[in-house]
Image (cartoon, helix red, strand yellow):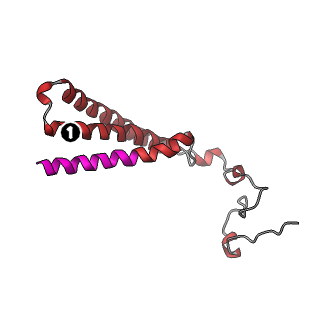
Amino acid sequence: MPTQRPSPFPTSWASLLPANVTVASGNDTNSTADDDYDYPIDELSPPLEEIIPVALVYFVTLTLGVTGNMLVIVVVARYRSMKNITNTFLLSLASADLLLVCICIPVKFAAFFSFTWTFGEFLCKSVFYLQNVSALCSVFTLTAMSLER
């Protein structure tokens, strides 16, 4: 008969947990992940008076970010007179910002409504990487612009 491992929490900590939460040891095969997150759905939903302002701010930010950055990209790429060193840096900055806006805003907006990750394994691994890459591209482009000036 296998020996049961002691709880990693002192008994005083275990008394602070709600009654429906169990502390599982590393080798406990009887517990499932669904047991730990069994909350009523109405407690997890934010009220409507919080959803509307947040949704409005995210929508306006996404719309202005995509529109403005796309306009910069189209104008600099299309017109020959706009192709100089400074505008090339602006093109790079606009593309990095467009990537950041298209990745960050929808994910942050969806995370506002959920306490768990629902986008799958690929997005779990790639979304934070792309956020950091686009932020670093913006920082390095601004640094290169200031050095060029």
- Where does label 1 land, which residue? 90
Q: Is residue 61 left or right of residue 36?
A: left
Secondary structure under the numbered disc 1 in the rendered image: helix
State which region is magenta. Answer: 131-149
Instruction: State the residue at coordinates (76%, 69%).
Output: 5
Measured as percent of width and height from the top left, residue 127 is found at 46, 43
Q: Is residue 135 left or right of residue 33?
A: left
Q: In which quarter of the image is the N terminus?
A: bottom right
Quarter of the image holding residue 90?
Answer: top left
Depth check: give the residue in front, 125 or 114. Answer: 125
Instruction: State the residue at coordinates (32%, 37%).
Output: 98
Instruction: State the residue at coordinates (25%, 31%).
Output: 73
What kind of secondary structure does the magenta stretch mostly adopt? Answer: helix
Measured as percent of width and height from the top left, residue 63 is found at 34, 33
Q: Is residue 47 at least partly visible in the picture?
A: no
Q: Is residue 144 at least partly visible in the picture?
A: yes
Measured as percent of width and height from the top left, residue 136 is found at 32, 49
Q: Is residue 144 magenta?
A: yes
